Image (cartoon, grey):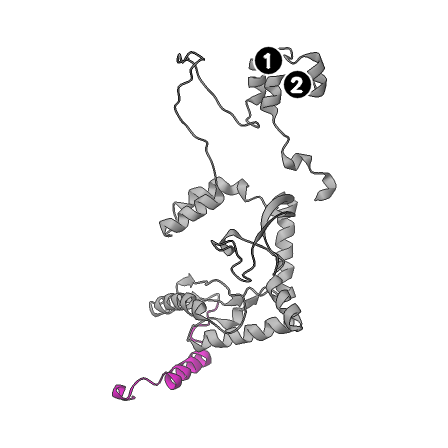
Amino acid sequence: MPDMAEGYDAQAIDVKWQDRWREWGTYEVENDDPRPHYYALCMYPYPSGAAHMGHVRNYTFGDLLVRYRTMNGYAVLSPMGFDSYGLPAENAAIKTGVHPRTFTDERMEMLRSSISRIGSVYDWRREVTSHDPAYIKWTQWIFLRFFEAGLAYRKNAPVNWDPVDQTVLANEQVLADGTAERSGAVVEKRDLEQWFFKITDYADELLDDLDGLDWPERVKAMQRNWIGRSAGAEFDMVVTDADGTALEGDLRIRGVHHPTRHQLWHDLCGDGPRTPPRRQARYGGACRGHRRLRGPRPRDERRRPDEV
């Protein structure tokens, strides 16, 4: 037992016990482990090089949870992997002249070594790398299932475009001054045709299930705003005529695709069109009430079949 008065020799003691944990497989967990199961997953990093303080902060929190649960008798499955596929690796290859796979593999080893060096514990046998063709195969398989179910589609939409990295950025990657978080370039707004997932089909389920999550309220509020469900608005107002006399009656506002729009059209127009014949030809024979209610056709209905 070392004399604590002599100080803690981190270089010697940390390395000793890290080697011992690897030798014993202390944090390697089998699927049939008889202990209660617990799954701890930290965000997989992009391998840009050795770990920086952001990595240390993030993975220390996860490491504390793994150790705490393990000491309380759980079989804790804690895998690690790398979000290693995408344009950043390609841009780095262009800049350095090194093949993207070679560049990425070298950075992964640097990050893997430094994460291990700070003492974070994982079951490294279960490592996942998103640039591995064996992994990409399954992302493609999942995408095809979405497409076949009608949950993946293409359309034009405005995006945040980074002219340096030549890629689309999420809103969270654009700083308050309008520059890109990674490259520092001034972000441009562009309309691009791109793929979308129909998350809106599950908006109600996603929102309702947020209430049962043990998350900080500010995080749940961000999720609710991101999903963006709107149930409309209710308000009071007074309608007057030209003399300022208050008018009695009901005001109803409906969207152009509301299921009752056709009935409302007939209520407004009766059996015959109210549009003069000369204007009927211009507007396809529709009365004014119908034109107001019909609105523009949805973009998906205007898309040609060969665009998907």
Residue 14 drawn in magenta: yes
Q: Are marks 2 and 1 in contact (CB under 8 Å)?
A: no
The answer to whether residue 152 is seen in the rendering is: no
Q: Magenta part of the protein: which range?
A: 1-30
Q: Is residue 264 above or below residue 151?
A: above
Q: Crowding near pointer 2: few (<14 within 10 Å), some, many (20+)?
A: some
Residue placed at 55% from the left, 72% from the top? 108
Residue 163, horizontal then vertical, whole percent:
62, 57
Amino acid of disc 2: Ala
Q: Is residue 303 above or below residue 53?
A: above
Q: Nearer the viewer, residue 146 or 169?
A: 169
Q: Crowding near pointer 1: few (<14 within 10 Å), some, many (20+)?
A: some
Circle 1 — which element?
helix
Residue placed under numbered mark 1 in the picture: 269
Residue 166, horizontal then vertical, whole percent:
63, 58
Residue lying farthest to the front in this orientation: 243
Q: CA distance from mark 2 to mark 1?
A: 10 Å
Q: Nearer the viewer, residue 111 or 237?
A: 237
Residue 23 drawn in magenta: yes
Residue 127, horizontal then vertical, whole percent:
54, 69
First in sequence: mark 2 vs mark 1 = 1
Residue placed at 64% from the left, 36% from the top? 299
Magenta-colored segment: predominant secondary structure: helix
Amino acid of disc 1: Cys
Residue placed under numbered mark 2 in the picture: 286
Residue placed at 36% from the left, 49% from the top? 217
Residue placed at 42% from the left, 65% from the top? 58
